[in-house]
Image (cartoon, helix red, strand yellow):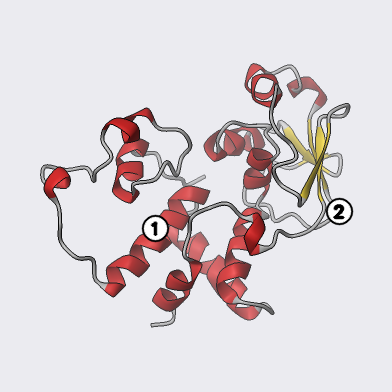
Amino acid sequence: MARYTGPKSKIARKFGEPIFGADKVLSKKNYPPGQHGVNRRHKTSEYGMQLKEKQKAKYTYGVLERQFRNMFEKAQRSKGVTGEVLLQLLESRLDNVVFRLGIAPTRAAARQLVSHRHITVDGKVVNIPSYSLKPGQIIGVRERAKSLEIISDNLAGFNHSKYLWLEWDEASKSGKLLHIPERTDIPENIKEQLIVELYSK
């Protein structure tokens, strides 16, 4: 499974945002990486801004270029605003929903749980992180995985009311996708219109 495995703090500093979750380095060095990062003052071009937003979205959701391009083309063919549909497709990925439900502390950890066959969808094991969920589907933790420290630690005290499009059942350690999230339900700081403009050139 192809994924980004490079230095995450460097990427977070590049965008000036904790896109991989809490980052101690970012609080100490809130300037771009590199020899001239602290003194860099050049103006970013329109293309540069569009490219930056695309890269930010890719790193945030852990998607590589070909997969991201395919999702954009799917969003273009769908009804609705292309940029919003793109974010909805990203949010509906199994690894992202496992993260949003609090089963894993990061999307990378969620991908690993899915790949290692610890997650079920409608009672069946699914080991494809990019699996696209549909409203009404139940995302659960396999019985033998419920005692895993990473899962129990993250679920302890997790606020499951943060996302109105998801429902959590504590007794069964499972969540339900109630509906596809609206743009206002998605907290990521991504200017999706810039991504649309980039791909439309």
The reply, left or right, for residue 160 in relation to residue 15 is right
Nearer-N-terminus badge (1/2): 1
Residue under the point 42% across and 62% down: 54
44 relative to 36 in the view: left or right: right
Q: Which residue is mark 2?
A: 136
Task: Indicate the position of residue 12 as horizontal and vertical percent values.
Answer: 36, 43
Give the amino acid type for the residue marked by disc 1 in the picture. Answer: Gln
- Circle 1 packing at 10 Å, graded few (<14), some (14-19), many (20+), is some
Mark 2 crowdedness (10 Å alpha carbons): few <14, some 14-19, many ≥20:
some
Task: Tell me the quarter of the picture where residue 5 sits.
Answer: top left
Position of 66 relative to 79 (above/below):
above
Residue 43 image position (x, y, % from top left): 19, 65
The reply to whether residue 62 is in sight is: no
Q: Nearer the viewer, residue 188 or 120?
A: 188
The amino acid type, in three-letter code, at marker 2 is Gly
Relative to 105, 44 lies left or right: left
Disc 2 on helix, strand or loop?
loop
Q: Residue at x 64, y 25 (%)?
A: 154
Residue at position x 40%, y 32% from top?
23
Location of mark 1 (residue): 55
Residue 119's label in the rendered image is none
Quadrant of the image containing the C terminus: bottom left
C-alpha separation, residue under disc 1 versus residue under disc 2: 31 Å
Please indicate, yes or no, whether residue 27 appears anywhere in the rendered image: yes
Residue ID at (78%, 38%) = 120
Give the x, y percent position of residue 2: 47, 47
Q: Secondary structure under badge 1?
A: helix
Q: Is residue 108 left or right of residue 163?
A: left
Q: Is 139 above or below relative to 136?
A: above
Q: Is residue 24 above or below residue 123?
A: above
